[in-house]
Image (tube, coloured by chain):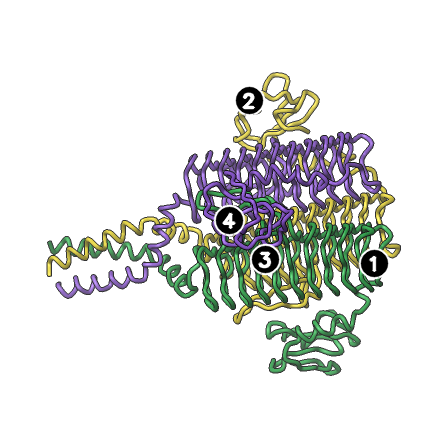
Chain colours: A green, B purple, C yellow
Amino acid sequence: VAPLGSAGPRELSFVSSARYAPRAAETRAGVVLLPRDLPCELPAGTTAIRVRDPHLVLATLLPILYPEAAGAPGVHPTAIVHPEAEVGAGVRIDPYVVIGSGTRIGDRARVGAHVVIGERCSVGSDTVIHPQATLYPDVSLGARCVVHSGVRLGVSGPGLTMTAEGCRQTPLLGGCHIGDDVEIGANSVIDRGAAGSTTIGDGTKLDNLVHLAHDAAVGSRVLLVAQVSLGEGARVEDGAVIGGQSGVDAHLTVGRGARVAGKSGVTASVRPGDTVSGYPARPHREAMRAQATLFRLPSVLRKLQELERAVQRRD
Amino acid sequence: VAPLGSAGPRELSFVSSARYAPRAAETRAGVVLLPRDLPCELPAGTTAIRVRDPHLVLATLLPILYPEAAGAPGVHPTAIVHPEAEVGAGVRIDPYVVIGSGTRIGDRARVGAHVVIGERCSVGSDTVIHPQATLYPDVSLGARCVVHSGVRLGVSGPGLTMTAEGCRQTPLLGGCHIGDDVEIGANSVIDRGAAGSTTIGDGTKLDNLVHLAHDAAVGSRVLLVAQVSLGEGARVEDGAVIGGQSGVDAHLTVGRGARVAGKSGVTASVRPGDTVSGYPARPHREAMRAQATLFRLPSVLRKLQELERAVQRRD
Amino acid sequence: VAPLGSAGPRELSFVSSARYAPRAAETRAGVVLLPRDLPCELPAGTTAIRVRDPHLVLATLLPILYPEAAGAPGVHPTAIVHPEAEVGAGVRIDPYVVIGSGTRIGDRARVGAHVVIGERCSVGSDTVIHPQATLYPDVSLGARCVVHSGVRLGVSGPGLTMTAEGCRQTPLLGGCHIGDDVEIGANSVIDRGAAGSTTIGDGTKLDNLVHLAHDAAVGSRVLLVAQVSLGEGARVEDGAVIGGQSGVDAHLTVGRGARVAGKSGVTASVRPGDTVSGYPARPHREAMRAQATLFRLPSVLRKLQELERAVQRRD
């Protein structure tokens, strides 16, 4: 598999959207995956395979085409695996990994160089942890997850909690439970719960540099774009999408399938299916209309003054 | 110590606020810490201990109940401690730690796996540094601090500086001094000073993914919530609280005890005790009123047009 | 070289701007670099050297004054360098570094402790990579770059892509190419491209905790201040400056030499040379005027009501 521009006649490439279609005319790829209904010309000698969603098909093909990308299984001699840790079959553990006592690593999991996994964690089968990630003790991570470099899971503090009177510190003694098929972008941070747990449901994807405060509860198939921050105890229900750099205040709920535009500040719960934007976040249309009006304000003020003068003249 | 839901008859649990009180009725914990005046029912067989602040009491009890959490003292054989570094009594240094020449580690400090500490640093007694954190050279860190995983202290660049004419780069040759009892959340970054120093006072807590530019000066008992950014030379005085995702422009002061709401952009200094919000940040009430009015604007415009017509009709 | 306050008679110090001039009167430094036209008194016994830009001069002097800061060249015995990796002359590789197969490290480069570099990467000559940074496979990094601690380059997912219908995941199979003289602040994250590449031009500086989504294209001599986020496929042309905590939506262009104020949300392309601010970002003056009017709104509303009553009285 290679990009359109560099793929050769023995390689597979793909066009994901109309944006990239023009480049396809000059590819030298042997085979190109195309969306079923995308107008797109290919050079002679290149075979088109039309599918509903090239990305989905690729995601299925990649592990078949590159079984060796996982590297040979085995534990690198420099890895320090506690004798009371349990390592499944076909696991690959890279140099300088440190794994604590009582931790279980599922079958075929891959643990990248320098990853540190604390005591009593569990890592599901086929999960990939990239270099330099850290799991604090007692974190559970499901099957087929991807954890990127520099992610910190189950962080135990400082546990800042916003209250009506200000902000205080809470000891974090709870858990951190992450479902199956979850992907977590680089340098993201997820706190453990205070008394309960911080949780992420199956199939959810977090982009880079995302922050989840203690006791946040994220449902299934949720998408959190880069640099999103969830306050402590915030709930994001199944299928919701939160745009980049947005924040959700403590203890609020973003309902099932709701959408929060980028850079929004959610200060009240969002109903299922709603789309909100701005700060404080409001229904998207209302926010756009208010914003548009804001830029007409100087002319409104002028008109008001004229009107005032007109009324005074008449007095 | 265990959460209400999982604590057994030989364990201690706690209720921090009314939010969690209903769960207490079904706990099997032997002892529960409760706020003095919180109405809260406990099952027979569970002993209530009422205290002013269960969190504070827990923070005191935890090191007594879990002395072994610190692990046995000692330097792991894979740790590379420079012969000219000085390591105090009862220190624990985990696998693959690297400590540079001229650095001093105080008594009973714990240095987590893979931590890298540069030359000429000092780490106070009883301080805990979690895995994968980095101290650049010449950083001083006080006693009883907690530095979370992935924190970078005393970073030496790029040192971007906003000026009236734009933005420029400054070489960072200064220091980075952090007081006692400071906690710094995961993946936070603190630049060293340019000519002077970046400083943090005693008892201050930084949440995850916080950024302090060079020469920022943070006082004592300050709370900076997740993803806050302080511009170069910004001052935050004692006891101030800055909400998540807020930014403070270069060389401004947030006065003693002031509060900045989340997602604010501070573009002018904030007086001691004031509460500000929004971008540009304004006194909180003024900002809330302006924001509320913004959403009434479309109806204001309609009313203005009606009035205009009324006046014209009368002409 | 030392700060004004601590430099002794055998040391060099500097004054970068009027802000620091008063401190110069009490320095004990032997020599002080000063801006050519800055009024500034020095004590007897201190030699002033007046230059156009003390920072630029310092940047030139530092490597001459501190050649040993780079440490002696050599590969630490604990570093794991794949036999099919290529290491140039005078390179320094610190403890516990891991370098993959097919990777090339240029002459005199320095690779800090615990850095992990994947397969088939190239690192230019004289480039410095600070401890704990990660290069995913196939990243190319130019000469004389500085990559700070915790940076993640060429991250392969989750590749969230905003579309008109919502947000979806894209497999990231492309490259990540970084030019010469680039500096990247601590804990910043740069995704690899989907089909094409994510690119950064020569002389560009990224501050701490910056995020570049897949296929972002950043030109030369661009400055991105802390916590900036670029959406997928966003373009930032040569010489542009983007203030801290700002975001640029996917597939937009910030034109050559344009300036985006801090905390802005760019939702439409910015023309070359323009200055924008706010969210959604607008020409800076317009945004400031609208914002100022916003705070006059409550009084506008009052005036409108008075006017209404005046008109009704006359009816």
The residues tagged by marks 4 and 1 sit, at their Cα atoms, a distance apart of 41 Å
The residue tagged 4 is C262
Q: Secondary structure at mark 1?
A: loop
Looking at the image, residue A274 sits to the left or right of residue B302; the answer is: right
- Do the residues bearing badges 2 and 4 touch, measured as CB atoms within 8 Å? no
Looking at the image, residue C258 sits to the left or right of residue C119; the answer is: left
**Which quadrant, please, contains the C terminus of chain B?**
bottom left
Tell me the amino acid under the disc marked 2.
Answer: Glu
The residues tagged by marks 2 and 1 sit, at their Cα atoms, a distance apart of 57 Å
Q: Secondary structure at mark 2?
A: loop
Subunit bearing disc 4:
C
Labels 3 and 4 positioned on one and the same chain = no
Residue B210 can be seen, yes or no: no
Q: Which mark is residue C102?
A: 1
Mark with earlier residue (2, 1)? 2
Question: As displayed, is residue B313 above or below residue B286?
Answer: below
The residue tagged 2 is C41
| Number of the front mark, 2 or 4 | 4
| Number of the front mark, 3 or 1 | 3
The residues tagged by marks 3 and 4 sit, at their Cα atoms, a distance apart of 17 Å
For this rendering, which residue is in front, B207 or A82?
A82
The residues tagged by marks 2 and 4 sit, at their Cα atoms, a distance apart of 35 Å
The residue tagged 3 is A226
Q: Secondary structure at mark 3?
A: loop
Q: Residue at x 29, y 50 (%)?
A: C298
